[in-house]
Structures are given as C-alpha cells and as structure tokens.
Image (cartoon, coloured by chain):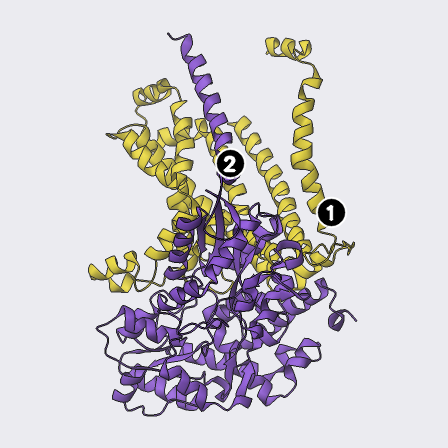
Chain colours: A purple, B yellow
Amino acid sequence: MKRWLPLVMAVLLLVGLLSACGGSQTSSNTGETSSQPSQGTTETKKNVTLSQMVSQGWTTDADEALSKKFTEETGIAIDWQVTPADQYHDLLKTKLNAGEAPDIFWIQTNPFAIKTEIDPEKNCIDFSNESWVKVMNPARLPAVSYNNKVYGLMLWSNSPEYVFVYNKTLFGELGITKTPTTYAEFKNDCATIKAKGITPIYEYVAAGWHHVLPFAQIGGRYEELHPGLYDQLNNNKIKYADVPEMELALKQMKECADLGYYGDDYMSNTGEDAQQRMATRKAAMFLGNPGDIKQIKSDYPDCKDEFGLFLIPYVDNDTFPFNPNGPARFAYKNSKYVDEIKQYFSYITTKESLQYKLDNTPSITNLDVTVDIEQHWLPQEQELMNSIPKDKYITVLQSAVKYTNEQWMEIGKDIAAMYMDTMTPKQVLQNIDERRAEMAKAQSDPAWTK
Amino acid sequence: MREGKVMNQSKMYPLYFTFVALILYIVLFIVPGFLGIYYSFTDWNRYSSEIHFVGFDNYKTILTSNKNYMGYIGNTLKFTVISNIIKIIPALFLAILLNEGLKAKNVHRAILFFPSVLPYLVIGLIFRSMLHPTTGFINQALRSLGLDFMAQKWLVDPNWVWPSIYAVDAWRGIGYVMTIFLAGLQSIPEYYYEAADIDGATFMQKLRHITLPMLTPSININLIFGITYGLKVFDIIYVLTNGGPGHMTEVINTAVFQEFARGTYGVGTALSTLLFVFMAVVGLFIVRFLNQREVEL
C-alpha cells in the first residue's frame, strides 16, 4: 500500500494541475462553444462573461439590475469589478499599461485628458458607427471622442454638479435665512451651525477625490477674475502658483478645516454615509448633487427636513460649475468579445433601459440623453439653475485646463497634506505645476517644449 | 572533512546540468533587471513610442523634485527597521511559548499563522473599517469601555498612522516569522537543555547560551526576509493609507506605482533602480555579516 501512495499522490497532483490549467482556459473561452441567437438583432455567444471595472460611486443598483436583465436575455454575464475610488485611477492605468485591462472600464472623461488617461487609439474599441452614439447629448461627445472617433458611452445627468446641498430646515431653525454668497457669510453660517454641536460641512478626504472639488469646481471664478486664464494656462503662459485666487481658495478650505467646520473625522471619511449624516442632522451641508436630495428622501423617510442647493462660496464664487464631462464606459480593444460589448452597450441605451435606470436611481434626477424619456427634475435644482445668469455658466477647472484632471488623485493627496500641515497652499499649486510640466513634456506639448 | 574534499574533487555532476536553469534565470531575472536599469536613463513614457537617452535626468528629478522622494526613501528605511523589531522579538517569544509548555499548541500556532494567509486587500478593508475614528470597531469598543481618551484617529493622525501600520503589519506577519522560529527551535537537540537543567541554568541563561546561538540560522533567515520585505514594502501601505494622509506614509514602491500609473516609466524605473542598488548593497552586507556571526557562534 505504501508503495502505491506516492504514485497515487503524483497522479492526483497531475490531474489537479491539468484541471487547473483547463479551468482557466474554460473561464476565458466558455463563450466560444455554444453560439445561440439572442433576442437582439445580432447573433451572440452564450455564457460569455464581460468584466466591467468601475470606481465606487459611479455605478448604481439600477446599472447592476440592467446587467442582470441583459444576462437573462442574452446569456452574456457582466462581472462588475467595483474598486475603491482612491485606488481606481492608478489601478486602471496600471492595467491598461500592462495590457491586462477588463473588457469594459469607466473613466472620468475629459477631452484634454482622454489621450493621457486611456490612449483610446491604442486601447479602446471605436464605436463611431454604433447607433447608440446618437443617444448621447452632442455636447458630451467631445469628452468621449478622440480624433473625431467616438470611443465611449456617457450616461450622466445634466444637474448642477457638486454644489452645496444644505439642510434648509436646519438653516431656518438656526436663523440662517439666506444662503451664503460670499466666503465671509459662509464662515459666519458655519460658526453658527458649529455652535449648535452640528458639523457644518461633511467632507470626506479618505476617498481621495472629493476634497479636490471645492478647489476645481470654482474654476469659473478664477476665469471670471482673470479673463483668458484658461487659455494662458493651456499655453503655459501662466502657472497655477501664479494665480493668487487659487491659493486663496486653498487657504479658505484649510481655514474651514482648521476651524473644525469639516468635523473631527473628515480625513477618515470615505463618503458612503454622507446622506445618512445629512438626514440625521449630524452634518448641515456637503458638496453633492441634486440627486443626493432625492436619495436622502428615498432612503430616510423619517427625515422631514427640506434640503436646498447653493454655489460653493470660496473666493466669493458666483459662477455655475458647468461640466459637460462625467464618468463614461469604454471598452478594451483587445477584448475577445467585441460583439458582445456592442450588444451590451446597445441594450443599456434603449429607451426602456434608460427610463429604468432613471426611475430606479434615486441619486439622479435626469439623464442627459436625446431619447424622449420622462425626467424627474427637482424644483431646487431648477431654481438654482434659473437664478444664475447664463454668462456665469463657466466650465470647471478640470474640464477646461489641460493636465489637471489627469492628476486629480495626486492633487487630492497634496491637499490632504495641506490639511495635515505638511504642505502649504503654495506648495500644492507648485506640485500641480510640476506634474503638468512633466505630463506636457512627456507628450511633447509645444507649449512646454519650445 | 576529508570525505567532503573527495566529494568536491570527484565532481559528481557536470557543469552543463545547470545551463537550463541558468538560462531561465538570466532571461527571466537578470535581463529584465538590467533592462530596468537601462530604462532609468531614458525618457521612456506612455505617451511616446520613442525612447531617448537622458543621462541622469530621472535621478536628478528624484533628488530635486517637490515630491520629496528622499522622504519616501527615509520612510521605507524607517519601516524596514521598526517593522522587523516589532515582528521578530515577539515572534521569538511566541515561538518559544508554543514550542513547549502550552496546551493545544497546534491550535494556537494555527491561529497565529492565520493572518499571514489573508490577502492584503482583505486586511486593508477590514482594518480601514475597524480603525475609522467615528464608526470603527476599535474606537467604539474603547468608548463603550469608558476609555474615550484612548480613541484615536488611527490612520489619519500624523502621530498614530505609522504605529497603526506597524501594528497591522505585525498582526499579519508575526505568525510567519514565528513559524520559521518554531522550525528552528524544533531542530535544537533536547539534551542541551537537559544538561543545562542539571547545571541549574535559569530560563534566561538557557535562552542566551543555548536557544539564541542555536537559532542563529532562523534569526538570519527572518532578518533577511524581513529586511527585503521592508525595503520592498507596498501592499500593506497601499491598502491601509495609500501613502496618506497626504504623503505621510509614502514609500519607494508607492511612488514607483504612481509614476507607472501616470505613465512616466523612466522616473519609475530610476526609483526602482535606486531600491535595487540599495537592497543589493544592504543584502550583501547583511548576508556576509550574518554568515560571519554564524561561523563565530
């Protein structure tokens, strides 16, 4: 018996190894074997799994429910790979650089950044001839296009993005009858709220991205104060560190943190409980979207407070943060399942799918699409949008200035360092300039290399 | 001794037996290593297919940049030293404890070793949640025990972030170090201790004169593993703090990762080359020193 034992073990080991090798082969090729027509117009392979990588917060339950419906109808499964926001950016770029990207991946789009972010000609499937391209608002096409070819699909709302969502009822109870329009008023209101033991602003630095917004969303204000600033920045005629208002914005953000207006745990917060804190009056305001009001009302029916919106008042900002960009799906050029990806994109852009997504996503009030679906605009957002003159609708910094969005997470680290007193506002700006120069030189941008 | 000489002289296996292994090693390890060093002298990046020789520009960037790369190198060295001290000393005593004189020692060994097999990502998610200042288990537990003053902002307070990382790293790594010590302890012949007992030696005397000298090979292995792990550290920092708060816990490999993510491969390889040279020098020095010590003992 003992003589046979090693032999049996060896055979088992061999079988195990072979089955393991076979297993990996199967998982990537299952779709090749059983082709069956779907309910759509194209013939599809059943039992294919498409991997879809997305940053936490960009996708919703409705997206996942739609992908399940799609699987039921076509047999094509979607494997969602949801990654924490602070790691997503680096992880995706590393995967793309290593040639191991998932079938579908999302990025925060930006016409200036699309080349540096994902190099679409090298990495992405060209969708220019797909019928669903027309579903997107033409204003959003530049963000998902490169050299006149469309590579991405953006289904995003057209709401005022990242303005202050505030508890109107609480403000009223504390005697704050008018929303702040200047930094001085804002600081006074924060002091009043803090005196009542409530955190004035819920901020979340640990997510890595959110705390950069107050600096970048008021780009319109910098441009308003220095007409032509965006062009000068894009042509390397001026640097971030040379713009006093940018430094002022960072100083004001830091001052709010130092005065305790962000609360005690803003450095550890990751944002998942933002609505809960607003609904339970642990925080009086946070930088969010109109959809957050909808979500608070939907998730916390006990909360009877009313919520409103106002512009970020740092540097006395009065401009509307216009942004035609947003998170969008792209597909990997070297994927084995190009037809299945196209089929999936077609499915999620039908009128029924879009209406389903909107109806079942409390965090959005509308979808910026050309298809005639029933939108759910909130009166608060319409009120805010109508109150701002159209000439004050100015594109946000990250969408207007080159080499900014690409370093969003690194700016986040620098601002966190500023909050920790290990960097000054000036140094934060100098670091941004240094990274911009590095990226520009690497791409042989004539404005930097001449 | 004489037998050994005869063995060497007879040369039982011809040299060409090593060729396949050598070729594989050269192709898979040596060549990529040297290519990496070569690329550190170029402007290799994601945006251009052309690569130009730029001399020491990438190294100059490292030394002069606003990004405080020297601070990251300092953090790496600090982590290497402290994390090893924190792991090796307790692991040694745990191994001695679990080698004898404790009931159900296999259960204890398994429990202590368990964290070593957990993926870093899982550890990161668990501990980030547990160490949250408001909603985390640790602070909530401390508060419920009336120990509010001990509740800290573990992963974001400049004074606590490194100790928190060391603690999580020790929690994960101590079982592994202990296992190597256990293997070493079990190879020490029992009669040394019996003889010492007869001579009336105390625990500390036995530890100093028998256990530690006989454990030297295990200590050396743990030191070499620990030092190389410390210098190459990435995962535990990445999952717990991602180099934050700000850049406070940035180490060489988190910086390399960021350079690669941004597509500036040249600077990334320059940083990796610095790490490689440093590790080679330190590794050589330590191996020689430890071998010398082993012979003396």
Query: Does residue A320 appear anywhere in the picture?
Result: yes
Name above or below for residue B14 compared with residue A95: above
Q: Which image quarter: residue A132?
A: bottom right
Residue A405: image location, x then y, percent = 57, 69
Please state which amino acid type lies under the numbered disc 2: Thr
Quadrant of the rendering where the C terminus of chain A is positioned: bottom right
* Local secondary structure at mark 1: helix
Q: CA distance from mark 1 to mark 2?
A: 45 Å
Q: Indicate the chain on which mark 2 is placed.
A: A
Residue A425: image location, x then y, percent = 54, 76
Residue B12: image location, x then y, percent = 65, 11
Q: Of residues A302 and B161, which is closer to you in this image?
A: A302
Name above or below for residue A124 compared with residue A185: above
| Residue B156's disc number | none
Q: Which image quarter: residue A438?
A: bottom right
Name above or below for residue B67 compared with residue A223: above
Quadrant of the rendering where the N terminus of chain A is positioned: top left
Name the residue beneath numbered marker 2.
A33
Name the residue beneath numbered marker 1.
B38
Residue A191: image location, x then y, percent = 34, 85
Q: Indicate the chain on which mark 1 is placed.
A: B
Q: Residue at x 55, y 33 (%)?
A: B290
